[in-house]
Amino acid sequence: MYEVYGIIGDPVDHSLSPVMHNVAFREKNIKAVYGAFRVSSSDLAKAVEGIRALNIKGVSVTIPHKEKVMEYLEEIDEIAYEIGAVNTIVNENGVLKGYNTDWIGVLKAFKENGVEIQDKKVVIIGAGGASKAVVYALIKGGAEKIFVYNRTFEKAKFLEKKFGVIAKPWEELNSANGDIIIQTTSVGLKSWESPVEERVISRFKVAMDIVYLPLETKFLSLAKKHGKIIDGLQMLLYQGVEQFKLWTGIEPPVKLMEKAIYEKVKNLEKEILK
Ligand code: ATR
């Protein structure tokens, strides 16, 4: 009997999680299959009920359900609660528990790429759902100062109150300065735009983007002229690695998973961006 895993979100048709987890299941001889389930917001409660009814063993949660899904789970891990978002559900004998592995994905992406966060000044662009896990990771990683710039200032203020970061108005982005800059908005997704100009990016030694389609966004293409870049697949990979461990208790084949998602994204670029 095969066990079933999957991702719920909307949209999910270009999700890289199926290829990433299926290659790991296969390599580890685990009889399991991972699928993508498009679930609209109005169907979320029913979908979670379906996880129980169908005994689906583990689920990844993505946009736009990471926050709302918390209402429907029996248990929430302490850190996921603190971040205010769940990206992973574990079905423990019918009891659904929510976790957040996005923040570990961020920390690991830096660590595996040889970037130290401790005592660094970090600028985050964006204060949406993805930004929360990034902020949490930077706090855990010991960043000295975290500045959050967002188009809608109130959302940056919300993060200031919740996590003690420094909220900055969008209009001041041109004077941003620091060691590391992280792009968390949807600007540059399937388009050739950067939310910040090259002369600003050039002040930073390291730049990370959470957008991975295209893999080299305009933001990263400008940044690589001035310093080190970390693409959006790195965070995706390591949040997935942690999910796999939570579901199976087994160390996954990270390199294989990495290869699979980079190949897949290359195909998506050909398919979608041409
Ligand atoms: P996610 O979960 O991917 O972070 P989200 O919560 O909708 O998605 O957040 C999207 C982020 O991209 C927000 O910071 C948003 O800014 P607002 O809070 O002002 O909406 C940012 N964003 C989206 N389009 C943008 C644009 N054209 N210019 C600047 N910021 C933009």
Image: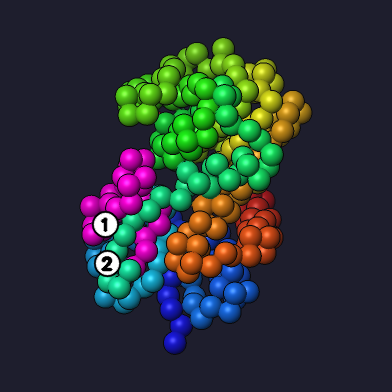
Q: Residues within 10 Å of mark 2 (few under 14, many from 20)?
A: few
Q: Quadrant of residue 257?
A: bottom right
Q: What is the C-alpha distance between the residues marked 1 and 2? A: 8 Å
Q: Residues within 10 Å of mark 1 (few under 14, many from 20)?
A: some
Point 26% across, 75% down: residue: 53
Identify the secondary structure beneath mark 2. strand
Point 32% across, 47% down: residue: 78
Q: For the magenta stretch, what is the residue range?
A: 66-91
Q: Amino acid at mark 1?
A: Glu
Point 29% across, 63% down: residue: 96
- Please tell me whether residue 75 belongs to the stretch shown in magenta: yes
**Mark 2 — residue?**
95
Q: Which residue is outermost to the bottom?
A: 1
Q: Is residue 73 left or right of residue 256?
A: left
What is the number of the mark on residue 154? none
Q: Is residue 7 left or right of residue 228?
A: left
Q: Is residue 211 left or right of residue 93?
A: right
**Mark 1 — residue?**
75
Q: Amino acid at mark 2?
A: Val
The reply to whether dot 1 and dot 2 touch (C-beta < 8 Å) is yes
